[in-house]
Image (cartoon, rainbow, N blue to C red):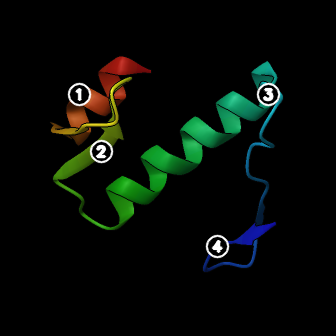
């Protein structure tokens, strides 16, 4: 479990299984709430492609909201 500042528990996704609809909705609400609460302007996403090269890009919180 992870804990937020108000001591509410946040259960991370378990590798090897998909989150169900309720878990996705809770995770989405948590991420958007945390981004707004902390005045986040950009989210930087990093990953490796299939050849192992590091790739990355940034999105705004508005783009994050639109994507969900």
Q: Is residue 65 left or right of residue 12?
A: left
For the residues marked 1 and 2, what is the alpha-carbon distance in whole angstroms? 16 Å
Q: Secondary structure at mark 2?
A: strand
Number of numbered callouts drawn: 4
Q: Position of residue 18 (x, y in %)?
A: 78, 24
For the residues marked 3 and 1, what is the alpha-carbon distance in whole angstroms? 22 Å
In the rendered structure, are the residues bearing label 3 and label 1 in contact, judged by CB atoms less than 8 Å apart? no
Residue at numbered disc 4:
4
Q: Secondary structure at mark 1?
A: helix
Residue at numbered disc 1:
63
Q: Position of residue 25 (x, y in %)?
A: 66, 30
Q: How crowded is the residue under tag 1: few (<14 C-alpha within 10 Å), some, or many (20+)?
A: few
> In the image shown, does 2 or 51 lie closer to the viewer?
51
Tell me which label, 3 or 2, sits earlier in the chain.
Answer: 3
Residue at numbered disc 2:
46
Q: Residue at x 63, y 41 (%)?
A: 27
> In the image shown, does 43 or 62 lie closer to the viewer?
43
Q: How crowded is the residue under tag 4: few (<14 C-alpha within 10 Å), some, or many (20+)?
A: few
Q: How crowded is the residue under tag 2: few (<14 C-alpha within 10 Å), some, or many (20+)?
A: few
Q: Position of residue 44 (x, y in %)?
A: 23, 48
**Which label sits on residue 11?**
none
In the rendered structure, are the residues bearing label 1 and label 2 in contact, judged by CB atoms less than 8 Å apart? no
> In the image shown, does 12 or 37 lie closer to the viewer?
12
For the residues marked 3 and 2, what is the alpha-carbon distance in whole angstroms? 26 Å
Tell me which label, 4 or 3, sits earlier in the chain.
Answer: 4
Tell me which label, 3 or 1, sits earlier in the chain.
Answer: 3
Q: Nearer the viewer, mark 2 or mark 4?
A: 2
Residue at numbered disc 3:
22
């Amino acid at each position: 479990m992870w804990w937020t500042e108000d001591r509410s528990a946040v259960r991370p996704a378990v590798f090897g299984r998909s989150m169900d609809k309720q878990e996705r909705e809770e995770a989405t609400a948590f991420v958007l709430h945390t981004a707004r609460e902390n005045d986040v302007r950009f989210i930087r996403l990093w990953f490796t492609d299939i050849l192992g090269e590091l790739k990355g890009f940034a999105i705004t919180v508005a783009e994050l909201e639109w994507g969900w």
